[in-house]
Amino acid sequence: MVFGSWLQAGEGAEWWSEETVAVVTGANRGIGLEVCRQLADKGLTVIMTARKPQEQLSSAAQQFLQEAAETGRKNVIFHTLDITQQQSVLDFVDWLKLTVGFADILVNHAAVDNSVIDWNLKEWNNVDQSTMLALLTWANGVSDKYESARGCLETNFYGTKRLTKALLPLLRPSSHKPRIVKRLIQIWTTLLRDEELRKQLCETASLTEEKIDEGLDMFLEDVKSEKGMDRWPIKYPTYSISKISLNAYTRLLALQLHDKACVNSVHPGYVRTDMNLGNGDLSPAEGAANLVRVALLPPGGPSGHNFLEGEDVEF
């Protein structure tokens, strides 16, 4: 099913207002910053977060905040938030509780890719970084080390889950239901080369947080020992397993909150960002629009779904 089918059901019914509060993580640049801009332009109150303090934000983010201040827009508020740090999350939730009191939308956008590029291989073969990152034939030129793998999982999976859980008590009940949107890339569980692992993460009915965590623990042990990697995705194994696990958690959370919130994931498309060295078919604004559409789907919209550039697709 495409976005249009869901949107037509509630066409013209803008359920949000300036009192609708949207929390956006990873908003320092690129897609995350554009999500903040577009939600603010629609009149919502946007809590823009990034792990860096405001004075260290990108020039684009600082300009956005400065323009909001100069025009007297009070619906854009910045707060530092490092989702990898428990205390930072707790401090943010306490601040949100005292300042606003609730949240209606959570857009989990913060993510990293700590893959290590083999620069010698790159130079010897005269291959550019974008080719090495894009083609499976150069997968051996992009590897994962234990510490970098832990850091990637801490942000992409554990940090996202940590913040989501901490904010659940602040999600405001309403007829349109609060929204949780997780930014993913289109990584299918079939990339796992171990049949038992695929089964463990695919069968939503028997899925548990413990099973997801067990899979991640197993992955880190294999990275550390440099053995057993033949069961994991060939290309960007850490980044891939972080997103596969987040896919699974999205489905699990949607089941747990079935009558309390709408939980969906979105692949914004192949967007030109710093993470993929500026390659892509879409601008950050176009990618952000795909996330915003899901965040603002009309009441009665789907939960536990995965969207790819406007289309409802399988995980």
Image (cartoon, rainbow, N blue to C red):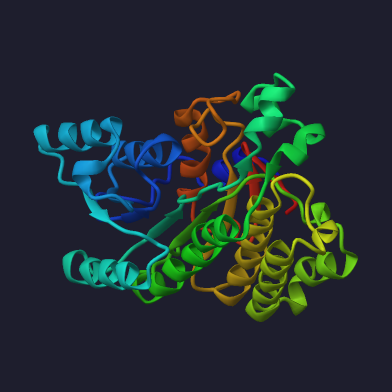
Looking at the image, residue 137 sits to the left or right of residue 133; the answer is right
Furthest toward the top, the residue is 126
Q: Is residue 81 above or below residue 69?
A: below
Q: Is residue 196 above or below residue 191?
A: below
* Residue drawn at x 46%, y 59% as measured from the top left: 179
Q: Nearer the viewer, residue 179 or 117?
A: 117
Q: Nearer the viewer, residue 16 or 239?
A: 239
Expressed as whole percent of the image width and height from the top left, the position of residue 196 reads 87, 70
* Residue drawn at x 80%, y 63% as measured from the top left: 227
Q: Is residue 98 above or below residue 179?
A: below
Q: Is residue 301 visible?
A: no
Please identify the quarter of the rendering in which residue 214 is found. bottom right
Looking at the image, residue 59 sits to the left or right of residue 126; the answer is left
Q: Quadrant of the C terminus?
A: bottom right
Expressed as whole percent of the image width and height from the top left, the position of residue 279 reads 58, 25
Furthest toward the right, the residue is 195
Please identify the quarter of the rendering in which residue 37 is found. top left
The number of numbered discs placed on residues in the rendered structure image is 0
* Residue drawn at x 48%, y 62% as measured from the top left: 160
* Residue drawn at x 23%, y 50% as measured from the top left: 53
Please identify the quarter of the rendering in which residue 226 is found. bottom right
Expressed as whole percent of the image width and height from the top left, the position of residue 64 reads 24, 33
Q: Is residue 57 visible?
A: yes
Q: Nearer the viewer, residue 304 or 86?
A: 86
Expressed as whole percent of the image width and height from the top left, the position of residue 76 reads 22, 45
